[in-house]
Amino acid sequence: MREHQNGFHVAFVGNPNCGKTTLFNAITGSKLKVANWPGVTVEKKEGSVEFEDEKLILIDTPGIYSLSTYTIEEKVTRNCILDDDIEVIVNVVDASSLERNLYLTLQLLELGKPIVMALNMMDVVEERGMEIDLHRLPEMLCDIPIVPVSAIKKRGLDILLHAIIHHKEAVTLGQVFSYSDDIEDKISKLEVIMQAKYPNHSSARWHAIKFLEDDEEVYEEHPVDVSGVVNKSYSRQIIQSKYSYIDDIIKECLFNKSAKEAKTDKIDALLTHPVLGIFCFLLIMAFVFFLTFTLGDFIKGFLEMFLEYFSNAVSSLLSFASVAGWLQSLIVDGIIAGVGGILTFLPNIIILFIALAILEDSGYMSRVAYVMDGIMGKLGLSGKAFLPMILGFGCTVPAIMATRALETPKDRRRTMLITPFMSCSARLPIYVLLSGMFFGKWAPLVSFSMYVLGILVALLTAFVANVFDKKKNCNNLLIELPEYKRPNLRSIRVYVWNKVKDYLTKAGTTIFIASIIVWFVLNLGPHGFVTEASGSFAALAAKFIAPVLKPCGLNMWEIVVALFAGISAKEVVVTSFTVLFSNNLEGAGLLESIKAVYPSFTSANALSLMVFCLLYTPCLATIATIKKESESWKFTSSAMVFQIAVAYALSAIVYNIAAIFF
Ligand code: GDP
Ligand code: MG
């Protein structure tokens, strides 16, 4: 049997943020990204599980509100559902906001495919003292199996799987309730036309309704002549009938629905206030920085001590084994200093990610996007564009992918252009290192200002792009606010661990290789190995370019080398810096050696360097992602040129202003 060998396909479909990915992870044991805001899952993901001698291929899809498609991610889901390989659709529903979720449910039911409802977030429902009538609810929804679950507490999962397996042969007619007589009459006529032309088609009723709603894609996929029946779009009546049926369901099935809302409203009055909300956001971010610096640096101190000890030990061991001098230098000064140096920043990074995880999972980050909605609207972007930008605080690569949630290609490109200006976590080590060396107790504030500067530059860019845009678009798409939740320890652990793993992998691959390459270009010259790095290939090339950076106060060949190397991954700027100067990561030592080479290198230069690192070309992985998502080399390369130009201009301005003060 085909099914038995390949497994049968089950798609998880539901509104954004209803817990599809959490459920998918809980069942398959994967660790896909989960966050308390819509638009995180942008591609469909597959996983499999064996249950009761059956193999199930589960598919996690991007969230959708309806089966009418506007964005790329919505298309992904719609195509996936309409695909005939899908044998059972699992409609994941957030039971704590049943009303909002049922609109999609009604549409899915009209498809006439086997559907099982996973009534998720039952823990929230119970905690709030809400009650759902689990006998009446399925009665009103074509008698589909409805299984209460809690993805996060892993409750009800086996029953859900059981229901899925046993429901795969079920036949539903696709009629949940009746529209007005007039519309029902047209539906029957259209069904006949559909069946005549496509006898094997399973979703005749759904298609008939879509014809009445004047859905272009359905016309394209299944062209039939409906001119005799459809003379105008009936979409308004159809939508209204659905909502009034949902009202009936809520009246009959949901009890005690009020409770907790008052508290949320009070908090939101502050956090989503147009002015105070932004102020709160900055305050919270500042606090995160304060933590990163104080606590993070404290732990980092121990790691540095350990690294020095380790490096000395390896050094003596290698000398003892009489390993060649150049190899010793490669291992100790190149690899250990480079990769080890990056690893000492782990505490800072972990604290940043714990903070981001808590802010995301609690539902706070969507408030930030909501607050930004007004501002973004004036910039010709929807508030939705701010969500990818927030993801950019972690890593730019998923942030660029998250732009798929935006409606138009123009919005997407604009957001892709500005998202790299958000300080990703790889830039944190640069700020920590430089601000720690040059700004003493002001270090957290200086680093924080880099984050703010990044946001401002991003917004300004969007503003300018909008001014020059002749066909302005008006975006009035409001972001929906998810409920506040107590952050879940497991989700946070998974989130942070994933990020730490990425960071370690990067240290072991990209940064490892970059360290070796940097070491070689610094130690090889036209006449073989050089004793002074300034005679190396890298130095020769960099000295040629360095004068260009004079207006920014960065006309030092070491900096040019570091900036170039940093394109592989931004942390490599720090790595190269350490390898270049002294191989000693301890703040004071490095500072002294920089001062020894460049006595005039002051805080102004350091500030300018931070600004440059913040704004210039993103790392290779990001560039590749931009290319992939925009499908255009032209756009990608012009974005890079633009970013370098902005970095150059701004660091020159910052340098010249700062030079007056320092
Ligand atoms: P998706 O957009 O549908 O994939 O939703 P996610 O899986 O990303 O989850 C959205 C948010 O809901 C996350 O913060 C999850 O931790 C949370 N969540 C998911 N399932 C449950 C649940 O059963 N109970 C509670 N309390 N929270 C849940
Ligand atoms: Mg998801």
Image (cartoon, rainbow, N blue to C red):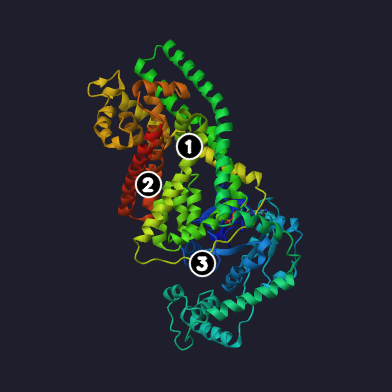
Left or right, 323 with reference to 487: left
Q: Nearer the viewer, residue 118 or 40?
A: 40
Task: State which tag comes first along the sequence, 1 or 3.
Answer: 3
Q: CA distance from mark 1 to mark 2?
A: 27 Å
Label 1: state its secondary structure. helix
Task: State which tag comes first along the sequence, 1 or 2.
Answer: 1
Q: Residue type at mark 1?
A: Val
Per the image, the residue denoted by label 2 is 623
- In the image, is residue 39 above or below residue 623? below
Label 3: state its secondary structure. loop
At x 35%, y 55%, the residue is 631
Q: Position of residue 118 (x, y in %)?
A: 65, 61
Q: CA distance from mark 1 to mark 3?
A: 56 Å
Q: CA distance from mark 2 to mark 3?
A: 36 Å
Say which of marks 1 and 3 sits in front. Answer: 1
Q: Position of residue 619 (x, y in %)?
A: 39, 42
Left or right, 643 with reference to 209: left
- Dividing the picture into quadrants, the one containing residue 96 is bottom right
Point out the image quarter for the N terminus: bottom right
Q: Residue type at mark 3?
A: Asp
Tag 2–tag 3 contact (CB < 8 Å): no
Around disc 1, counting alpha carbons within 10 Å, would you say few (fewer than 14), some (14 to 19), or many (20 or more)? many
Label 2: state its secondary structure. helix
Q: Position of residue 102 (x, y in %)?
A: 63, 68
Around disc 2, counting alpha carbons within 10 Å, would you say few (fewer than 14), some (14 to 19), or many (20 or more)? many
Q: Which mark is residue 446?
A: 1
